[in-house]
Amino acid sequence: MNVLQLNPESQQPADNQLKTRFWAVGGGKGGVGKSIVSLNLAYWLAKLGHQVILVDADLGGANLHTLLGIKFVNHTLADYLNRKVDSLDKITIDTPVNGLQLICGASDIVGLANPKYTQKMKLMRALQDLQADHLILDLGAGTDYNTLDFFLYCHHKIAVLTPQPTALQNGYGFIKSAIYRAISKAFGRNTRLGPLLKRATDQNSSEPIASMEELAAAFAAVAPEYGEKLQEILAGFHLYLITNMVKTGRDRKAAEIIQTVIKKYLQLPNITLLGNIPYDQQIEECVARMTPAFLTNAKSQSAMEFYSLVNTVIREGHNEITAAAENQTTIPAATT
């Protein structure tokens, strides 16, 4: 299929039919290709007629603008956080891709990699005011609280993996840290549950809680409603997995392996395997030249895989719209 001959209107959501969908792209370590995934996801969504805003939320190492071939930027997130501008609209810039806008991070500002709580909350509130079909946050590496909180902020959470064993371990560790961060935020002030959370997250605990199933049972033993609330948190955790830099058939099984481990130990029911992105030497060359790979060859194997991946994203969105409409159907009250 020649993706350049597609009719964008066939994939574009109807006016006012779809609210902004928030995506976070994260991972356990640097070098797995989070920024490349974020950029290609944004590109193909825009190519198919969606309005997309890509946010460089890697506040310690912003680089999305260079991957788009933009060498100099006049405004970054630092201008908003430091109150030089009063809205994110004023630092949103156009890109070479129609329908795709960018908000740049600022890695050269001391302290921005670890914003204060008030700054973080201010940014999260401001993101809700942006007008787009899709808002994509490209996060930094690691499991610090700010990165995890931005990951949890988005309803749709993408974890990028690579097939190497250490990368898989780090990827699982990132996902585990995120879900336990969500649980801690919900129950952290509960003195009855605090010791249980500590046993579940402290590797040196003398009485470890080794799985989410054990933690749910321990919560329910304290009070049934705590176990029910924990199950609600797990059910609301929508996780998407992408394996990047795939070279062999065995590599393609990496996400399935992680999915199995996640379901067994973390009890997450909503996991979608979005796709396997093949290793592409051309991407590395384009990064070095600061030229977007998709503008060089939109028919490469990796580009086609990203296109397929984005169609899955769109399909997921349409399914959510249908489900939401069904849930909002009014049922007349019974009369006596």
Image (cartoon, rainbow, N blue to C red):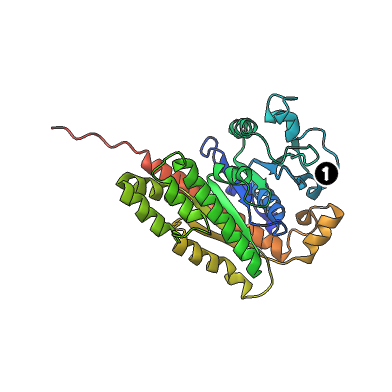
Q: How many marks?
A: 1
User: Which residue in the rendered view is the most extreme toward the left?
Assistant: 336
Report helix, strand or loop for mark 1. loop
User: What amino acid is labelled 1 in the image?
Assistant: Ile
Q: Dot 1 surroundings within 10 Å: few (below 14), some, or many (20 or more)?
A: some
Q: Position of residue 25 (x, y in %)?
A: 63, 50
Please tell me which residue lies in front, 300 or 106.
106
Q: At x 31% / y 51%, what residue is drawn?
A: 221
Q: Quadrant of residue 167?
A: bottom right
Q: Is residue 39 above or below residue 186?
A: below
Q: At x 64% / y 44%, what residue is drawn?
A: 137
Q: Position of residue 13 (x, y in %)?
A: 55, 43
Instruction: Give left or right: position of 245 versus 329.
Output: right
Q: Position of residue 40 (x, y in %)?
A: 69, 53
Instruction: Give left or right: position of 295 versus 10.
Output: right
Whether residue 161 is visible to the viewer of this picture, yes or no, is yes
**Residue to which mark 1 is pinned:** 70
Q: Position of residue 235 (x, y in %)?
A: 42, 51
Instruction: Check the picture and name the quadrant holding the N terminus.
Output: bottom right
Whether residue 314 is visible to the viewer of this picture, yes or no, is no
Q: Quadrant of residue 326?
A: top left
